[in-house]
Amino acid sequence: MSVKQISVFLENKPGTLCSLTEVLSKNNIDIRALTLSETKDFGIVRLIVDDVLDACAVLKEEGFVNALTAVLAIVIPDETGGLNKLLKVFEENRINVEYMYATPGGKNSKAPYMIFRVTDTEAAEKALAKTGLEILDQESLY
């Protein structure tokens, strides 16, 4: 039950991030989650959007290099230690977190969603299924 994330490679200079969001905006593509990491020369924007295939197509047409990646979107319990509970499952199952970022929960949820890129998505899904933690699919994010 993974979610498709778009990674876009951007030159690290003023205006490139705005150009990316402009393309998405003009094409009525809604950003649901976003993170940006950078180095001296380039950045990587990771996006969860409402229409993945359309977004990839318009980004490619506009010259943005992008790639799709399977990630996990998990509802973090709105309680002290909620994230720790989840990370313990990964630790116990020797699943490495490559990166993660947060996004607000859905319309009817106070709990945040965390997006995880892990070394073994299938193993992570199996381990989490036993815990009662909610793993979201693409449609559940919207």
Image (tube, rainbow, N blue to C red):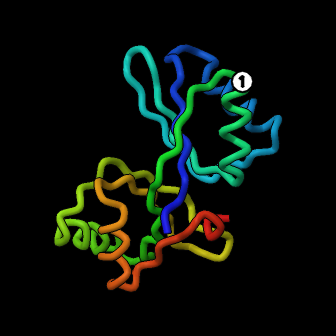
Q: Is residue 7 above or below residue 42?
A: below
Q: Which residue in the structure is indicated by mark 1?
A: 62
Q: Position of residue 101 (x, y in %)?
A: 43, 51
Q: Is residue 111 above or below residue 28?
A: below
* Residue 109 location, quadrant: bottom right
Q: Provide residue 57's location: percent of width, then percent of height.
A: 71, 36
> Amino acid under label 1?
Glu
- The residue depicted at 69 percent of the width and 24 percent of the height is 19
- Along the line of sight, which residue is nearer the eye, 58 or 22? 58
Where residue 80 appears, x then y in whole percent? 34, 75
Work out whether 120 lies above or below 132: above
Location of the C terminus (image quadrant): bottom right
- Decide: is 32 above or below 78: above
Residue positioned 73% across, 44% down in the render: 54
Q: Residue at x 65, y 50 (%)?
A: 49
Q: Which of the two residues, 130 or 79, is positioned nearer the viewer here?
A: 130
Residue situated in front as seen by the camera: 35 or 56? 56
Q: What crowding class fits label 1: few (fewer than 14 Cα within 10 Å), some (14-19), or many (20 or more)? A: few
Which quadrant holds residue 25? top right
Residue at image coords 35%, 48%: 99
Describe the element under mark 1 as helix, strand or loop.
loop
Q: How many marks do you count on the picture?
A: 1
